[in-house]
Image (tube, rainbow, N blue to C red):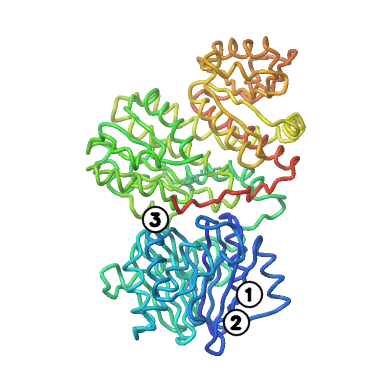
C-alpha cells in the first residue's frame, strides 16, 4: 500500500527520503515520486515502477532541498502511471503525498473544476492539493488551509504537505491511515512506518486519529481532532536498523521462514511463571475480562484469518469456548448479532489493516465491551484501539507473504485458548499438556526446516502447473487454505483448498494427472478418514504429495509421494505442518522467477478498503 516519507532538516533530505522509500518497498507499490522545496520553488521527480528507477532519474538530474516529501503509490484511483504518481502539485507551490482513499473526491473534483483548477491525474488525491491551494488563494495561512481541507474530506488519509512560500514548515496529518513522526536532532521526519526512518532516528511520536502536526527544524506542534494543541509522548524504538535487512538470504520471505523458531520463542518468553500461563500476558485487567466473557468472535483478513480459523477449532475442541470467526470485510457490513459479553479477538500482523480496524469499530458500535488484539506491531492502530493485547514478537515482516507472523499468531492464539478455556472448564491436565506442547514448537520447526532441500526438489513438480489443490481436515483444513494462499500469491499458480471430506461434493471432478494435490496428513483422529480421501484421489489418477508423520512408516505409492514429518502432538501440528507449505510456495515462486517478496498487485499493509 502507499508509503509516505518526508522530512525537514538542515541537510539535504533527498538521500534520506530515497532510503526511506526503499525501506517501504515491502508495502507494495507501482510508482514512486519525490518533491522538494528549494529557493521558494517546488521541484519534483516521479517514475513508474521501482524506487531504483526514481533513484536513476535523480542521479541523472539531481534535485535537493532541506524540506521534501516522497511517496510510493499503490494504485487505487487511476492506473499505475507517472501522471498518477505522487507528489501531486497545485499552482506550482503546494505539493501533497497521500495514503488512503478520499471518498468524496468526485464531488470535490467537480467543484474545483468549476473554480478553474486543472487536473492532471485520475487520482482521488489531487483534489486535496487543489483544495489546499484554493484556501491559500483565499488568504488563509498554510496551516489553516490544510486544516480546512481535511475538515471536508470523507474517507481515510495520511498526508504530507509542503508549500514553497512557507519553506520552514512540513505539515503532516492522519485519519484512518498510519503516520509516525521521527524525532531527530535539529530535524523531523514523517513516515508510514518506523522502518523507513530507522537509519536516522529511533525516537518516534505516534500520531492519533485526526491529529495534524506542523513540523519545523526545531519544533513540532500537534493539534488533535478538536483543534487543541496536544503533546504526544516520544517513544524509543527497540528495533535495530538491520532488523529490516535481508542478510545472507536471497529473499526476505526465506529469511522470515527461517526466523520462525526464534519468533515463537520470543512470543512465549516471559508469559509463563513455572509453566503457568499468566493472565497478565494479555493486559492489565485481562483476568477480570476473561472471567466475564461468554463467547469469542474472531475478526481478521487473509493469512491472519486462517490463523483465526485454526483457533476456532482450538477454542471449541480444547477450551469448550463458543467461538465464531468472520472475514473482517464481511463482518463490518453485515449488521451481525453480537452480545456485549463477547470477547472480540482481532488478528493482524500489521495492525493497520483497514477492514480489521473497521470491523473492530463496528463490534464496539454494536455494544461489545472487550476487544483483544493479537498483533505484531506494538504501536499500530489496532493495538491502540484494543483494551487487551497479546503481541506476537516476530520482528518486522517484510515479505508480502506472511510466514513468521502466521505461526507466531497461532502460538499466541493457543495461549489465549488456555487463558479463556480454563474459565470454561479446561482441565488443569489439558492446560499443562498444551503449555508443554507450546514449548516444543521452536525445536520442531528447526527439524522441519531440515526438509528444505527435499522440498526444493519437490517444487519442480509444480513449475509447469497452472492449478493445485490443497487438502486437510480439522485444524489442518485452515493450514491447507494457508498453503494454497501462499502458493497463489507468490507463484501465481491457481490454488484452492478444501476440507478433504468435501472432495466428493464437487472438487473431485477437477482431479487429473495435471493437478498436484497437496495433502496435510498429521497423525490425528481424522487420519483414517483422510487416508480414504487420499485413495479417492489416487484412484482417479490424481498426483498426491502427502505430508505425513514419520512414525506412521508409510512409503510412496504410485501417484502418492510421502514427505515425512517429525512426530508431533495434534495440538501443535497445525503450526508445524505450515512450514513445509511455506517452503514449497517459496521454491515454486523462485523457480518461476516471480518477485517473491513483492508479488504483483499485492501490498503488505492493506490500509485501504
Ligand atoms: C498474507 O500472505 C497476505 N499477504 C495477506 O493475506 C495478509 O495476511 C492480510 O492482508 C492481513 O494482513 P494483516 O495481518 O496485516 O492484517
The span from disc 3 to disc 1 (Cα, nearest Å) is: 29 Å
- Helix, strand or loop at label 2? It is loop
Name the spot of residue 271 as percent of width and height, x first. 42, 43
Q: How crowded is mark 2: few (under 14 residues within 10 Å), some or many (20 or more)?
A: some
The span from disc 2 to disc 3 (Cα, nearest Å) is: 31 Å
Which badge, 3 or 1, comes first in the chain's sequence?
1
Residues at circles 2 and 1 in contact by the CB criterion of under 8 Å:
yes
Q: Residue at x 57, y 18 (%)?
A: 523
* Residue 458: quadrant of the picture: top right
Identify the residue under disc 2: 12
Q: Residue at x 23, y 35 (%)?
A: 339
Q: In the image, is 535 to the left or to the right of 184?
A: right
- Helix, strand or loop at label 1? It is helix
Residues at circles 2 and 3 in contact by the CB criterion of under 8 Å:
no
Judging depth in this view, the residue of 536 and 333 nearest the camera is 333
Identify the residue under disc 3: 381
Name the spot of residue 57 as percent of width and height, x first. 70, 72
Whether residue 294 is situated above or below residue 372 in the rendered picture: above
Identify the residue under disc 1: 15
Q: Residues within 10 Å of mark 3 (few under 14, many from 20)?
A: many
Q: Is residue 243 visible from the viewing direction of this image? A: no
Judging depth in this view, the residue of 300 and 274 nearest the camera is 300
* Residue 128: quadrant of the picture: bottom left
Amino acid at each position: 500500500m502507499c508509503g509516505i516519507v518526508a522530512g525537514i532538516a538542515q541537510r539535504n533530505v533527498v538521500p534520506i527520503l530515497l532510503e526511506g522509500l526503499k525501506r517501504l518497498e515491502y508495502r507494495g507499490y507501482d510508482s514512486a515520486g519525490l518533491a522538494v522545496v528549494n529557493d521558494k520553488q517546488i521541484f519534483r521527480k516521479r517514475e513508474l515502477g521501482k524506487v531504483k528507477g526514481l533513484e536513476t532519474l535523480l542521479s541523472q538530474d539531481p534535485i535537493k532541498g532541506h524540506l521534501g516529501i516522497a511517496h510510493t503509490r499503490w494504485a487505487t484511483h487511476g492506473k499505475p502511471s507517472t501522471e498518477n504518481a505522487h507528489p501531486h502539485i497545485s499552482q506550482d507551490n503546494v505539493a501533497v503525498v497521500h495514503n488512503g482513499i478520499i471518498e468524496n473526491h468526485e464531488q470535490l473534483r467537480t467543484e474545483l473544476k468549476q473554480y478553474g483548477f486543472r487536473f492532471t491525474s485520475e487520482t482521488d488525491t489531487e483534489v486535496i492539493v487543489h483544495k489546499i491551494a484554493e484556501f491559500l488563494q483565499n488568504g488563509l495561512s498554510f496551516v489553516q488551509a490544510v486544516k480546512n481541507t481535511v475538515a471536508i474530506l470523507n474517507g481515510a488519509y495520511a498526508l504530507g504537505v509542503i508549500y514553497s512560500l512557507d519553506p520552514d514548515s512540513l505539515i503532516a496529518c492522519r485519519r484512518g491511515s498510519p503516520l509516525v513522526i521521527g524525532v531527530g536532532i535539529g530535524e523531523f521526519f514523517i513516515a508510514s512506518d518506523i522502518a523507513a526512518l530507522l537509519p536516522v532516528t529511533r525516537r518516534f511520536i505516534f500520531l492519533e486519529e485526526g491529529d495534524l502536526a506542523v513540523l519545523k527544524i526545531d519544533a513540532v506542534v500537534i493539534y488533535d481532532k478538536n483543534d487543541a494543541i496536544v503533546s504526544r509522548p516520544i517513544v524509543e524504538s527497540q528495533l535495530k536498523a538491520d532488523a529490516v535487512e535481508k542478510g545472507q538470504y536471497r529473499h526476505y520471505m526465506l529469511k522470515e521462514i527461517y526466523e520462525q523458531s526464534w519468533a515463537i520463542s520470543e512470543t512465549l518468553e516471559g508469559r509463563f511463571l513455572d509453566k503457568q500461563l499468566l493472565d497478565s500476558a494479555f493486559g492489565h485487567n485481562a483476568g477480570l475480562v476473561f472471567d466475564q466473557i461468554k463467547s469469542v468472535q474472531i475478526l481478521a483478513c487473509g493469512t491472519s484469518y486462517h490463523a483465526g480459523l485454526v483457533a476456532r477449532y482450538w477454542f471449541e475442541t480444547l477450551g469448550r469456548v463458543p467461538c465464531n470467526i468472520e472475514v473482517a470485510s464481511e463482518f463490518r457490513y453485515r449488521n451481525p448479532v453480537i452480545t456485549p459479553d463477547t470477547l472480540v479477538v482481532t488478528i493482524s500482523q500489521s495492525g493497520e489493516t483497514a477492514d480489521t480496524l473497521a470491523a473492530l469499530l463496528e463490534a464496539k458500535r454494536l455494544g461489545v465491551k472487550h476487544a483483544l488484539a493479537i498483533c505484531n506491531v506494538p504501536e499500530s492502530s489496532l493495538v491502540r484501539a484494543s483494551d487487551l493485547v497479546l503481541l506476537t514478537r516476530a520482528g518486522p515482516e517484510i515479505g508480502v507473504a506472511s510466514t513468521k507472523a502466521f505461526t507466531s499468531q497461532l502460538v499466541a492464539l493457543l495461549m489465549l485458548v488456555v487463558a479463556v478455556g480454563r474459565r470454561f472448564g479446561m482441565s488443569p491436565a489439558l492446560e499443562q499438556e498444551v503449555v508443554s506442547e507450546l514449548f516444543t514448537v521452536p525445536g520442531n520447526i528447526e527439524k522441519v526446516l531440515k526438509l528444505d532441500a527435499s522440498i526444493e526438489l519437490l517444487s519442480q513438480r509444480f513449475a509447469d502447473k497452472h492449478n493445485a489443490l490443497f487438502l486437510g481436515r480439522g485444524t489442518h483444513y485452515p493450514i491447507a487454505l494457508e498453503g494454497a494462499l501462499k502458493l497463489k500469491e507468490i507463484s501465481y499458480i491457481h490454488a484452492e483448498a478444501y476440507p478433504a471430506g468435501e472432495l466428493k461434493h464437487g472438487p473431485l471432478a477437477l482431479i487429473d494427472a495435471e493437478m498436484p494435490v497437496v495433502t496435510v496428513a498429521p497423525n490425528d483422529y481424522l487420519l483414517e478418514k483422510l487416508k480414504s480421501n487420499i485413495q479417492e484421489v489416487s484412484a482417479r489418477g490424481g498426483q498426491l504429495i502427502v505430508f505425513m508423520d514419520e512414525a506412521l512408516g508409510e512409503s510412496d505409492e504410485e501417484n502418492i509421494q510421502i514427505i515425512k514429518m517429525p512426530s508431533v502432538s495434534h495440538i501443535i501440528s497445525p503450526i508445524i505442518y505450515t512450514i513445509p507449505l511455506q517452503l514449497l510456495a517459496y521454491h515454486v515462486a523462485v523457480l518461476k522467477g516471480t518477485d517473491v517478496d513483492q508479488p504483483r498487485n499485492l501490498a503488505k499493509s492493506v490500509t485501504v478498503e
